[in-house]
Image (cartoon, helix red, strand yellow):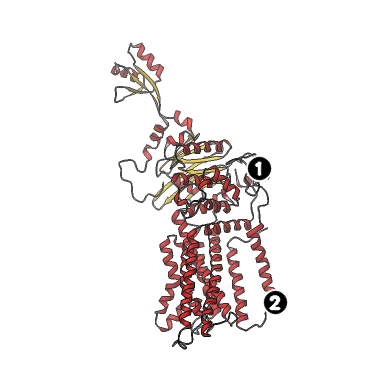
Amino acid sequence: MSLPPAWAIPVVAVAVAFSAWCLVDLARAGQVRYLPKWAWAVVICVSVPGGGLAYLIVGKARPAASVPWTAPGAGETGIAASGPLSARRVPVSPVVIEVDQLTKRFGPVTAVDALSFTVRPGHVTGFLGPNGAGKTTTMRVILGLDAPTSGRALVGGRRYEQIIRPLHVVGSLLDATAVYGGRTAWFHLLSIAQSNGIGRRRAMQVLEATGLAAVAGRRVREFSLGMKQRLGIAAALLADPPVLIFDEPVNGLDAEGVRWIRQLFRSMAAQGRTVLVSSHLMGEIAVTADHLIIIGRGRLLADTPTDRFVSGTRQDVLVRSPRAGELTGLLTARGAAVRPEGDGGLAVTGLDAPAIGDLAAGHGIAVHELVPRHASLEQAYLDLTGGSTDYPAGTPAPEGTAAS
Amino acid sequence: MTAPQIAAAGRSVPSRLVRARDVLVFEWTKLRSVRSNHWTLLIAAVVTLGVTAIVAQSAASAPGPPPGGPVNPLTSSFLGYGEYTVLPVTVLSVLTFTSEYASGLIRTTFTAVPRRRAVLAAKAAVTGGAALVAGELLAFACFLLTQAILASSHRGLALSHPGALRAVLAAGLVLAACAVAGVGVGAVIRHTAGAIAAAVTVIYLLAVLCLVLPSPWGDRLGRFTLPFAAYQLITVHPQPGLLSPGLSMLVLISWPAAALLAAALVIAGRDA
């Protein structure tokens, strides 16, 4: 059945009000002493379907069948009733986020520049980059808040705007402070639930699971940043969606909250969900994410599993010896690169630790320290993004840069 | 994973009607859950009835017919209503959008309902509907209060007097029109201060400007403004230089319609 779009409702309401007024006007002006039969016919023809429409809107209309990633008989919310946040008896249907040649310009500033990547289900994907790299802009385009200058971002093969009842597919939290302070936590969450046909019981359940049930009746204005974060996370989890998108979710959380949210991400991914979490700090994300997408100045720098990101980057061997000068000559002759470190140590690349040890022993050079070193995740990340920081410390920031 | 596959996965698509209801309920919950809305409305009602009583009392105690003609028992019912109800309700309706833009909640709203025109329509319908109910209630209260006070000097009107019921109904409709116009202006301008200034300009100041224009032009232009059109609807004897009540009704509908149209044109294309 094809129905009129939503904007038709106020139009119909105004039309009905206008017709009613016209009838009253005619009667009052004495032009009709009583309404003729055809006028009653018009009134009935308008008011009966109008009343039916109102009845359907206000009351009884319900979605016909269940939602796919729902346990049978899960009720009106489309969510399994038991369990704190998710108790799926049916596996999550996998949904992929595809960003394809995405470019977004704000006037002269290019926030995102021909960015392409795919976020797969079953993983926590860390979305990393320095401040101003374009992480938030990319997420906003994925969520249909910003229109891309070119390229596209698809969730489950569709643009976000094309998804019907999108909270059932994507749960997101961009900015936890973006709430209206005069509303209570309960009404904030309830309104969001209602917008996507989610019931009160589920809203209450999510509040309880995020530890906010006791403060549900308090106005959001009084909340700390950490409580607002929890409220935002509660809203994202309302419909138990297969895709989760979080922008800097750890900000403002206390240690317990941080641990809670990390466990949440991991368990969500383990259930087969697609989890995209942004951060500008590698240390924060490395413990949770098993896949990394790193961008700088709007461009893709790395798209790799977390463990391979570390092993694929810089590694060297630290050597200390009383006869460092002699050893340097030998190592260089073997083709290794030697960089003296400040404290008398040598950073050797191109030869591994056993080869260096053998070489020194063969020439009777004592070695006091021989340590193979991997760059830390943090160091590898800094090496990668070093050239692409918009505001390196010590340099004044350029005016009018929009993205973050 | 493509779109048909998602559909094939079994997620039923709720009908447009159900989705429209969802958005309406969404906006209704947001409207009713802000405490200051209730207080503002209550204070506006109290002040309006107080001013109405004062106006009626001074009309009742005026010795004989005043110079400008006999006391108009109908129009004087709505003097307080026209300012102390219409102005605060207009401001509240402007805030339905601008407060969301100011706090950033609009991004949550558009993430929950990406069809932004549906959000606009729902806000207009919910705010306009609430204003219509409040307006009709207050209009009847103002009319009955005024007539009760005027009855002491035998100048009152009954609701059955020709044109009286129409005027009272129209007064309620004026409030709804101003509220819907406020929603549209708020959606277009987004910033609270600017949007309130623009809405007050549309609803009051254009008419005030027309009052000070030289003779024929004041009425010629003024009849297309909201207050002149509203005046034609709430009086038993429409002024001859202005539009007929029917056309005034059209003017009354056109302003909010124009504001909504402008909002619908800009709201979808902008970055939220």
What distance separates the C-alpha of mark 2 from that of mark 1?
53 Å
Tell which tag, 2 or 1, sits nearer the viewer: 1
- Can residue B236 be seen here? The reply is yes
Q: Which mark is residue A71?
A: 1
Q: Chain of mark 2?
A: A
Q: Are marks 2 and 1 in contact (CB under 8 Å)?
A: no
User: On the rendered structure, is A316 left or right of A201?
Assistant: left
- Can residue A155 be seen here? The reply is no
Question: Residue placed farthest to the right in the image?
Answer: A37
Look at label 1 and name its amino acid. Ala
Secondary structure of the residue carrying numbered label 2: helix
Secondary structure of the residue carrying numbered label 1: loop
Quadrant occupied by the N terminus of chain B: top right
Q: Residue A316: horizontal and vertical position, in percent?
A: 38, 24
Q: Residue A222: horizontal and vertical position, in percent?
A: 45, 50
Q: Chain of mark 1?
A: A
Q: Earlier in the sequence, mark 2 or mark 1?
A: 2
Look at label 2 and name its amino acid. Trp
Q: Residue at x 43, y 50 (%)?
A: A105
Q: Which mark is residue A162?
A: none
Question: Residue placed farthest to the front in the image?
Answer: B152
Task: Please give the residue where the numbered disc 2 appears in the rendered image.
Answer: A38
Q: Within 10 angstroms of label 1, few (less than 14), some, or many (20 or more) residues?
A: some
Q: Residue A154: horizontal and vertical position, in percent?
A: 54, 46
The residue nearer to you, when weighing A201 against B265, is: A201
The residue nearer to you, when weighing A49 against A387, is: A49
